[in-house]
Amino acid sequence: MKPTPERATPVGRADLLARLTGVLHNRGRALVTGAAGIGKTEVARAVAARAEAAGETVVCLAPQPADRHIPGAAAAALVASVPAPALDGLPQPQRTAIAVLCREAEDPQPDLDPIALRLGLARVLRNLVGRRPALLVVDDAQFIDADSADLLRFALPLAPPALRVLAVEPPAPYGTPSANGHPHGPVVPDSPDGMRPAAGIPLWVPSEADVLLVPPLQADEIAELLVRHRLPSRMAGRIHRASGGNPRIALAVGRSLADATTPVHHAEALPVSGRARDLARRMLADATESVRASLLLAALALRPTAAMIRRAGRPDAEADLAAAERAGLVTLAEDGTVAFTAGLLPSTLVHDTSWTERRDGHAALATVADDPVEAVRHRALAAHAPDEGLAAEVTDAARTARRRGDSTLAAELALLAAESTPGLPPGRRLTRLTVAAQEAARAARADLALRAAGDLLARDAEPADRVRARLAVLDTAGQGLTDLDDLYAHAMEDSEGDPGLRAAVLLRLAVKYVLADGDPVGSRAAAVESARLALAAGDRNTAAQALTVQARMDRVLGLVAEPQETLTEACALEAADGPLGSRNAAQILTIRHALFDDRLGDARDRLHALLPLVERRGPVEDSIELFRTLAEVESRRGHCAAALSHAGRSLALTLEAGLSPGPAWFALAVAESAGGSFTRAASYARRSARASEEEGDHVFLSRSLYALGRVQLATGDVAGALDSLRRVQEGERAQGTVDPSMLRWHEELAEALLANDALEEARALLADVAPVAERLGRTTVLLGFDRVDALCLAAAGRTEEASGLLARTAEKFSGHGLPLEQGRCLIALARVERRRRRRSAAQEALQSAAVIFERAGATPWLELAAEGPAGASRTAAADLTAPAEGGVLELLTEAESRLALLVGQGASNQEAAARLFLSVKTVEARLTRIYQKLDVRSRAQLARTLNSDTLQ
């Protein structure tokens, strides 16, 4: 197991690595344990890589299963792995014993001196330390043979404290005795509040403080893992549920997705055959027949408990489940509730079990279930054949589940009712299949919607039912609307002659046109026709949604300054169609428009009024969008902690529903860039961009690239910002977006151009869009342009005008309740004042910015301001190392002055290129211009000129 630097920080393991480093430092010994595939080896490799990078001697052992039966195999491998100097100075008896161990003795049948061998190995370990610390990593320590374990138990206590030992071993399976003789091994922390038994380690008897359990990854960490391995991340939530946070299973499922011959949409089951299913089978392979029988009942039950499984015919249920918990297959709560550690485990158990066993299990559970809904479900799943009486009971159970608010169970039962209905006469079954598809859409259960639709479309259903089934599948597709053209085409064909259904299909097409095709003109046309047909058919819900899409496209296209009339009509229809919170598209767009206009107080008030109702009555997609919008609103208002909280909630709901995480990652990028970390913000923005590209979602691709470019600009990555923001420019122009308030990329791109010495292009960009913003009355958009205009003035040498404009713009931003924008203006003002040699004014501006950022909780911006000129100069718009008025650097542009200062301080062309995120050719060309302007011919002359100017 050779340590590699690129593995130094496995996904989601930073805290564990910090704890592990502390244990090794304080105690000298550590045992890492956890379920198979959880990442124990990756953690050990990371520790080894860090130790090696710190100059320590690292020796790694990874015994194989066969080694366990070869006496002395691990000890011989250890001797073969240590550096040659560790064998120096051994007395002859010990050297001979070591040679015998390693089969290197000259005597063909030597006698092995066990004492000499023990002492020799102890001396080797002492020599291993030498003048620097050493780390011994033993992966799969359970495969160490008994003779080697005995030798190491003798030698390790004699080694100096500078030799630290890290062992990796899985928990003891199913209650088998561990190597140290304890039946379940030492107790180790399973979580901050719980304990679990683990396997003993043969090298020493660990205490609780020595042992660290590798926990499952969270859903967001699984997404990062998929991105790191260049696998599709858009289904990270569903993959997390299937894997239970186990990285090996998650990667297997992710690779199944990547290897699929056709794209897998949210409306399809995850491909869990092949590699992923085999991993689950290996995890279950050691389960005894009794344990497996109890686990099968747990897999079949909705809310399994140990007591329920015992009453269903498993008298040893508690013992079986405790053994399964030790093996990392399930977790047991204090009340006996059973939860599988990975969703793939129960599905594999059920998949690999015969129908007869499943039937018997459901029949047993039906007799002990204390909830009538669950009892009916089990009876239906145990039924030999469709039965109308039973189907009617399941239909009633579905209604009960819906009244309880359990939309997922309602969807499952609705489909079960349809499948329990006799095929003849066909009408009742088809009706129930249609209902099941619609229930699945309400619950965002794409897999159930596809099952119901597939069954219905395979039968001789009426065109209306076929349309409704297809619409249910489309409604669960999330952002992934590409490659679904056949569904739309068939729905259009089947809706011919039915205005209400045609309106519903056109509404979905309107959404597809803008999200997947980037065609707002086509989207608006489809929405207008959908609204007309829906109103004619008396379908207020569809009409309200269509008018909402029309109002959205009106704003995108800049057709009217305030598409309020259309939106007001949509809101009225929405309110008349059902209770508040059940229909929300028009209200949500009203809030989005308030956000675009920076009427943030109004947006926040509306959000807080609507959100509780939507959480109680509305679809989960609306809750997700409201939390995401709240994150954007609070970020803009400078309430950064709240923004982070709302963005996190949006992501949690997204992953739970199995929807594409692209939009939620965008919200987190925005929130992190305001109040978290620029590094995390860039990471989330890149994930969002990738997921949006996978889904073919043009809207959120542009948004995520905008968020990335803004962070790159703030952190001084001018080349990266230009690349990201130019992609936004291309995308927005291709989509025909006119209104600059919906995505404020213009000012960011102009600033990046300015930082890249493209003053005239920056001015042209703003001059082109400013009249549109004025016509549409986008006041705060124009303020952003003013900030960049001031930077252009400063670049042209008109620093006094720039200073005055920045001061006025900062005050106006404050008046609009935009503290972060105010702070950005103040940072830019500090730069300009420094150029004017008004250092006191520059420091005052920075201090004012710091106060604003601190009050807002804007951590990354506060760090820039608090660090003073050195920190603020990292931003493209706040380079306080720019030339001071009257100096020789006044002859240079800002981009040239930055390069001149770096080269004058001794940076090579390659180093300067890396620091400024430029190509070496660009540096060379720019340096030639600098030499010409300053009339110097060498780096030494440039340094002298700059130093002389500083002294003046």
Image (cartoon, rainbow, N blue to C red):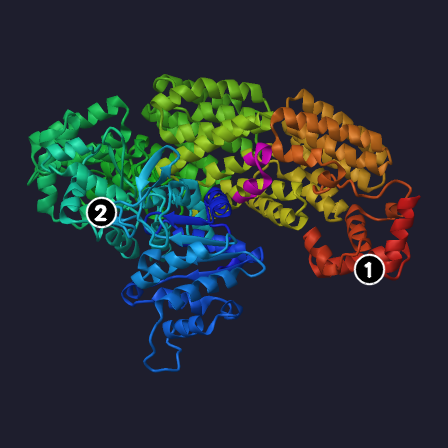
Mark with earlier residue (1, 2): 2
Picture layout, residue 44 above or below residue 408: below
Give the Cα separation between the discs numbered 1 and 2.
Answer: 73 Å
- In the rendered image, residue 841, in percent from the top left (x then y), is placed at 82, 29
The answer to whether residue 223 is seen in the rendering is: yes
Q: Amino acid at mark 1?
A: Thr
Name the residue: 42% across, 27% down: 585
Magenta stretch in the rendered image: 672-683
Magenta stretch: dominant secondary structure: helix
Picture layout, residue 80 above or below residue 16: below
Name the residue: 65% across, 27% down: 854
As helix, strand or loop, the secondary structure at mark 1 comes to helix
882 vs 166, left or right, is right
Q: Is residue 676 magenta?
A: yes
- Nearer the observer, 291 or 690: 291
For disc 2, the neighbor class at 10 Å (few under 14, some 14 to 19, many from 20) is many
As helix, strand or loop, the secondary structure at mark 2 comes to helix
Q: Amino acid at mark 2?
A: Tyr
The residue pinned by badge 1 equals 928
- In the rendered image, residue 233, in percent from the top left (x then y), is placed at 42, 47
Residue 537 position by quadrant: top left
Task: Tell me the tag on residue 237.
Answer: none
Q: Is residue 614 magenta?
A: no
For disc 1, the neighbor class at 10 Å (few under 14, some 14 to 19, many from 20) is few
The residue pinned by badge 2 equals 174
- Nearer the observer, 426 or 72: 72
